Each structure stands twice: as C-alpha cells, then as structure tokens.
Image (cartoon, coloured by chain):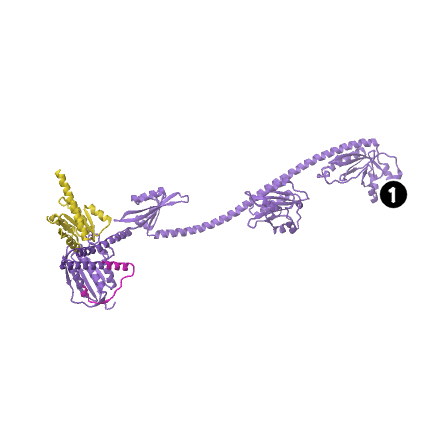
Chain colours: A purple, B yellow
Amino acid sequence: MAEIIQSKTNSTIDYAHVFNIKFWEGIQYKLAKVLGIAIKVISEDGKINTEESNFSEFYKILTSTENGKKLCSVKEITVNKDNFVTLYGDFDYYCANTYFYGRKFYILVGIKEKKLNEQIIKELSEKAGVNYNELLQAYQNIPFFTADKLKNLGDLIVDLFNMVIELSVQEYITQLANKQKEEEIAKMSALMEASIIINSTRVLKQLLKIIMQSAEKVMQAEASSVFLIDNEKNELYFEIATGPKEEEVKKIRLKMGEGVAGWVAYTGESLLVPDVSKDPRFAKRVDEQTHFITRSIICVPLKVRNQTIGVVQVLNKIGGGTFSKSEIKFLEALASQAAIAIENTNLYEHLEERAEQLNKELKEAMINLSIEKGRIESILQSMEDAVLAVDKEKNIVMTNRVAEKLFTLKTEYAIGKSIESYIKTKEFIDNFNIVLETKNITKSEIKLTLGNKEHVFAAVFAPILDEKKEIQGSVAVFRDITDIKELDKMKSEFLNMVSHELRTPLTPIQVYSELMMTRKLSEEKIKTFSTIINKETQRLGSLIGDLLDLSRIESGKGLSLSLEETDFTEIIKNVAETFKSASEKHTIVLNIPETSEKIFVDKNKMIQVMTNLLSNAVKYSPNGGKIYIALEEKNDKIYVSVKDEGLGIPKDDLPHIFEKFYRAKTEDIKKIGGTGIGLPIVKYILELHNGGIEVESEYGKGSTFTFYVPKSKII
Amino acid sequence: MSEKKKIVVADDEPFILSALQETLSEDYAVYTASNGKEAIKTVEKVQPDLIILDVMMPEMDGLEACKQLKKSKETSSIPVIILTAKGQITDIEKGFKSGADAYVVKPFSPARLIEKVEEIFEKVEMRKKIIEEKKKN
C-alpha cells in the first residue's frame, strides 16, 4: 500500500513555519553521530525534509553526477509490510510515523544490515556513471544495524521528534504573543504619535498625512486615504491619499453612498470588506481610473461632535492577508484622533480668522463709534434743549452747552457730583427718582426761576438702560417753553379780546335795532338810534378789516396798496369829524394847514391809520381830555402826530406796543379792551408806504404817536 | 303807582351805556356810570334797587366793583347783574364769586334784559315777603 505525498493547502496555519526545524536538525545530527545511524524525517507534503546519513562517503560519490542525483531523489515513500522503506536504490530504513497539525511525518531510521549484493552496487555505479570500486569501498564502510535495533531506535526518535514538535508549538505561541504585543505597542505608539502631531501641527493636510502614514505602517496596508464630505454638493472628495496612486486618486469625487467610503459616510458605521470583489457596495470606478487593484478595505467614519464629516480608509494588507476586526477599532481610534485634529485646526483657523475679523470689526466699530460719538456730541452741543444725564446715584454724568448755561454749571467740575448740589427744585429731583425707580419715561412742565424770571420748561426724563434692561441712570431733556407759553397765553387773550371787541359794537346794534322794531319811537330817536347803529357797524367793519389785514400779513400775502393822489389834510379832517360826535368827553384839536402837498398814498389805508390812532387816543383817555392832531411837511416827508392826555404807556410796555397781540401788562390799561392788532397794522401800512411811526409817552401823562410818509409822487 | 325802581348801570362804552338807558328808562329810573369807581359812588348816592355792571371797564372793573359793593353793609343786599362780552365759564365763575346775582352776555336783546331785571325784582319781592312773614310769626 502506497501513500502519495501531497500538499494540503486548506489549513490556515503554516505548520512548517511553526516547526522549529533548526532545533530538530541539531538533535538529528547528534543522534546520527553518536549512534552511527541514518535518520530522515519527511512530511507528507514534502515541506519538511531533514536528513542525516551514516553513508556520507557513499552518498557523496553517488550524487557526484547528475544521473546519480536523480537516483538519490526521494519522490515517494513506499512502506512495506514490515514497516521498512527502501531508499537510494538499496538502503532499507525502518519507517515510524507521527502527526503534527494533522499532517503525517515519516521518520526513517537506517540502515538495516543486508548481505552484500555486488550486482546492485554495480548497477548503481553504472546508472550514476561513477567508479564501481570506489562506490563498493564506500558501501562496505557503512555501518548497518539489525532490524530490531532499528525498530527500537525508531521509537526513541519518534518520541524525540514529538518533543521537538511540542517545543516548537510552544515557542511559536510565545513568539506569536510577543508579536501581537509588539503590534499593540506599535498601534499605541502610532496613536500617541498621532496625538502628539495633532497638538503640534496646525496644517491639517500635513497632519492627516502623518496620521495615515502611521496607520499604513501599523496596519501593513498598501494605501490609505481620508475623504471629507462636501456638504454643498453632497459628495466626498479625497483630502489625503497615500500609496502608489496618490495623484490619480485625488482627482476623484464620490457621490454620497457611492463605494465603500460613500457608504460609510452615509451610514456613519465602520465597515470591513475582506474581499471587495464580493461586495456590491464597492465602486470599481476608482480602481478603473487609478489602475489600482483594491482587494480589501477597512473604512471608518470621521466624526466631529457626532457628525460625520468624512471617512478614513486603508486598503489591502501587504502580503495579501485580510484586515482583522481588531484593526477596525484601531482605525476608529486613529480616526477620532484625526477628527480632533480636523476640529482643532478648523478651530485654530476659525479662531484666527475670527480674531482677524473681530479685530477689523473692532477697528471699524471704534471708528464708527468715534464718528457716532462726535456726531452725538455735536448734536447735543448744538441742541437748543438742555440735556443732563445722571447715573443711578444721581451723580451728573453728562451735560450739554445749554444745560451748562441754564443751571450755571461747568461740565468739567459738575461730572461726578450730585445733581442735588446744583438743582434744588423738588419737582426736578422727584422726576429723576421716579425714572430711576420705575424705569418709565416721565413728562412734565417744570417751573424754574432763572435770574429773576420764572421760566417754564417742558421736561422729559428717560431711563438709561443697559443691554440687560437694568437701570443705569437717567437723562433729562429740557425745552424752555416760556415764550411758547407766553404766545399761547397771548393767543387765548387775543381770542378773548377779539370776541369782546366784536361783541362790543354788536351790543348797541342789537339793542337799538330791537328797540326800533318793538317800540313806538319819535322821529328824532329813530334818527339817533340808526346813526348809532351805523357808526357801530362801521366800527365792526373796521375791526373785521383789521383782522383780515392781519391774517393777510400773517399768511405772507401782505397788503396791496391802491395809490391815489391825496391831500392828507382831508383825511385828517374827515376822520376827526367822525370822532367828534362819538365822544362828549373828548375834544379834538386840529393843528393842520388848509392843504398839504398831494402825495401818492392808499387813501383808505391812511384813513385806517388815522382811525386807529384816534380811537386809541379816545380809548386810552377814559376820563376824556383834549386830543391834538398836527400835520407838518418837513424835507420830503409829511409828519402827522396824534397826542392825547390819557393814561400813557408804562415804560415796560413801550417797546412792545407795535408787536402784534401785545397787550399792556398794567392792570388799569388791561381793563380797556383792545385786540393788540391795531398798532401793528398801522406800522405795517406805514412801512408799506416807505414811512414809519414812533411813540413818545409817559405813564399817566398821555401819549404822542407821530408817523411820517415820504412825499414821493410815485412809489 | 309806586315810585319807579332805581337802577345803576355802568359801562365804559358810551353807546352801550345809552342802549341800556334806552332799554330800561321806560320802566325804571336809570343812573349811569362809565367805570367801577363811578358806579360805586353812584350806588352809594342813589341806593338803587338793582345794579348792572360791565366787566371790562377802566379804573375799576365790574367784578371788583361788585365785590366791594357786596362787602359793604349798605349795598350788599342790592342785586347785581354782570354784563360782559365774555361768555366763557371761567368768567361766569368769576362773576358769581364776586357775588353777582345774575349774568347777561353781550350782545343782548333789550326784551331779554328787561325780563331778567323783572325776574330779579320778583325774587327780591318774594324774599321780602318771606322775611316779613317770618317776622310776623
């Protein structure tokens, strides 16, 4: 029965690699030398084949030729029924066997004694082409052993062989463990290295490259790459690629979900593909474009704060093996280091960018702020309102020019001082207190005595709040509304006066007309009554005329003049005539020439002027008296004066009497009705004629109004 | 027929004064004054049954004159009508504060003024009767 030596390749462990052949060969040599025996150990697949002979001279001679070598080659072992094997033509070996890793090992021990067969030696020498005598001589020197002895020696050698196997296995395991340890240490140091790099370099590409190179080294990979996700296009691009096809690879972009990298980027889960040809997820496109042959891949996601920003992959184990699952963990650890690196560099880059940006913004803001500050400052300073700000403790923090003047303070001394040391007015301080407590805006009218005059201010007190809406102080804006108030008062007084002045002539009109209607009256009375009605109607008319004139002047339309050649003495005579009959108490004394030079004036307007002056003279001399009217031609002008012996005008009122709506402040004059529009209109009419008017008066002694008009023929 | 009742009227406007006189002189004896001071003097002299005062008058205005008349024991019981061109509430208030009994706004109808005057005299009569009756009791 014959056993064919054949190789079995389905075993995953290389037993030949495990078996410590050197160790065995040493033992085998010593056994052969000491015992003078030949030993041969051969595995069934022929991978292990050791031999120590006791026929070295014979073997040397025989294998000295090519043919002899052929004769000596052992192609198959044929074991006979006595467990003997014949090798090298005529040598009988005892054949024992043992098993290692499921493989049969033949252990041959020789050589069995045998009667010299010269014929066989001769055939051998002929076949090999060597000298017969030399070969025979060498054969006769070979020590031979009996079959029994060989059997005993064979069992002993099997035991020894088994011991060597066992030692070999143990040694292999130890070695393996050491190797794994070394690998772990390499991985650890790679990780350490990566983290050191991460902390030391800020150039991302350089950093990732170093990380990937160390991954390649530790994992014994042919190539590696880092993809990052382009969120805008929803694609992956190569950030880093190492290995032989680096340049080609970098041009390629993967769609999300495309290829193993795309898959990992999409799912965020690590993936080990031992054989890409069997995985449909593998994108052949990349290999086709790069002419790289991918066999196996480990691909892990690159996550920054739980978000996948890319993937890291290593390709092809050097020497053709596959990646193990433990290597996924290593790559994941490395990827997390890379992610930190990316984040750090992004952060640095971002920070630098941001710092630069902030710096720029800050500069701009500073410029804007100073512009804005300057603008606000100049607005505050040019404002006609007083502005005064205080902090929470009511210490002054800001004042403007008007406030300085108003409260007689100097900003540089006042800043930081209590507002109460400058302004005692209770209402003022109360408003600040209310604002600081309630954060509300208050509006009020505050009366402050400045110098010796009381001023009225419209004051707004507003809170100054910070970003958190916390109160930081209060600002007060003051507008002096004394004049507005005055004007307001004047306006309402004017309306009252107008109302009074209108009703005054209306009263006799209504009374007399009603009496005429309801009573039987004498002819004489009817005449008197209707004369009064007529006069009062004229008075009403002239008042309404004054009001209309005023409204024309006020609205900017002005008064239009219709000029005609006029003798001024006629106007005076006519007006004086109407007044003579109006009052019994007053005497009008005319001091005018017969005629005067005819000049161009608006006759009706001049009548209006004279009527106004005369009615004032009558009105303001309630106790009666003389009223003098004089006309004088001097240079190119005609001067007319109206003098009364009435109340006169107090000194304080004198400068204001031509101002519209102005009414005397003195009580006894106030009691005399008037609208305050007559004199302003008189002045306006005269100025329109290029003339003017002046007044001389002493309180209690009457007044003299003197006006003039130029004697121009044509205006 | 008993003697005509006496009324003192005061106004600084001559035509208004004459209008008042014309209106009232048919039934009453009318005495005129052209300001508050004059009015008081006249009142003290003639001891009228009614006084009609314009508000805006020189020297002394109607309200002031009214106040003074109401203060004086001799004249305080004489009813006063205030006559003014002003019709605003504040003026009416001022009028009553000064002690006036009635208020007539200018321009006025003579018939209405006569009514007002008669009304006041009726009230005075009523009061007199009540006081007399009280005295009897």
Residue A711, quarter of picture: bottom left
Amino acid type assigned to the residue bearing label 1 in the image: Glu
* Residue A206 % position (x, y): 58, 47
Q: Is residue A607 visible?
A: yes
A235 and A573: which is toward the camera: A573
* Residue A6 % position (x, y): 77, 40
Residue A555: within the magenta?
Answer: yes
Total marks drawn?
1
A60 with respect to B60 (left or right): right
A552 with respect to B52 (left or right): right
Residue A29, quarter of picture: top right
* Residue A403 % position (x, y): 32, 49
Residue A186: within the magenta?
Answer: no
Q: Is residue A346 above or below residue A51?
A: below
Mark 1: secondary structure: helix
Q: Residue at x 79, y 31 (%)?
A: A155
The boundaries of the magenta stretch are A543-572
**Residue beneath disc 1:** A126
User: Which image quarter is the C terminus of chain B in?
Assistant: top left
Q: Is residue A83 above or below residue A587?
A: above
Q: Is residue A451 visible?
A: no
**Residue sitting at the far right:** A119
* Residue B135 % position (x, y): 13, 39
Residue A146, quarter of picture: top right
A618 and B126: which is toward the camera: B126
